[in-house]
């Protein structure tokens, strides 16, 4: 009995380590910054967090900044009839690969993001934070329910916990 318990413990430990190894802050293949960091992206799935509580119709808009690695960021959403906007200045942390971005929203709020997967045609991307506590799925246009389910499954296949995702464009918030 002790041997079985010990083996189950070792197996569980190994499976836990394997799951942790899957979901990591690993960047996607290189990103063409000129294609990616311009225009509007719809936030179609996210993990709940205090800053987005009650927000629907989230949009992140990018524009190139003054420097070669600078990106201007405008995050917006709707709370009731009011638009809530948070502007920031981003810096590409891995020039050439272009999948890591640090956004300074104000002197006290700086957030790092990593693009962990993207479409070849730049129609969607999956993003996380280095601590893996945030997960976002963005698309260029509103996806069908089937397409959204595929993107959630893709994030899950990468090892991310998708069980708490909310879908701000469908109004399905936790």
Image: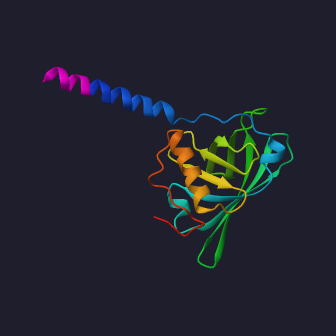
Q: Residue 55, how many percent across, how many down?
A: 57, 67
Residue reaching furthest left? 1
In the drawing, does residue 152 fall left or right of residue 15?
Answer: right
Is residue 118 part of the magenta span, yes or no?
Answer: no
Residue 132 seen in the figure: no
Image height of 80 relative to 149, above or below: below
Instruction: Give percent across and percent down for residue 41.
Output: 71, 57
Name the image quarter holding residue 1. top left
Magenta segment, principal secondary structure? helix
The residue at the point 52 percent across, 40 percent down is 157
Residue 146, image quadrant: bottom right
Residue range (magenta): 1-8
Left or right of residue 140, residue 137 in this image: left
Q: Please say if 59 is above or below 10.
A: below
Residue 117 percent across, percent down from the top left: 64, 41
Q: Is residue 160 visible?
A: yes
Image x and y of residue 129, in percent: 57, 43
Q: In this view, does 60 lie above or below 170?
A: above
Q: Answer with left or right where residue 145 lies relative to residue 35.
A: left
- Give me the residue at 51% from left, 54% from top: 47
In front of the other: 168 or 8 = 8
């Amino acid at each position: 009995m002790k041997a079985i318990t010990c083996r189950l413990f070792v197996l569980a430990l190994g499976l836990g380590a394997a799951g942790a190894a899957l979901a990591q802050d690993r960047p996607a293949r290189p990103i063409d910054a000129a294609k990616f960091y311009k225009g509007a992206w719809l936030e179609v799935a996210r993990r709940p967090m205090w800053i987005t509580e009650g927000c629907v119709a989230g949009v992140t808009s990018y524009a190139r900044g003054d420097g070669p690695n600078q990106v201007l960021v405008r995050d917006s959403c709707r709370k009731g009839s009011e638009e809530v906007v948070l502007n920031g200045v981003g810096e590409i942390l891995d020039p050439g690969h272009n999948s890591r971005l640090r956004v300074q929203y104000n002197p006290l709020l700086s957030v790092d993001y990593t693009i962990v997967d993207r479409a070849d045609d730049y129609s969607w991307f999956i993003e996380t934070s280095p601590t893996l506590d945030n997960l976002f799925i963005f698309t260029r246009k509103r996806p069908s329910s089937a397409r959204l389910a595929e993107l959630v499954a893709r994030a899950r296949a990468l090892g991310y916990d998708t069980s708490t995702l909310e879908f701000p464009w469908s109004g399905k918030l936790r």
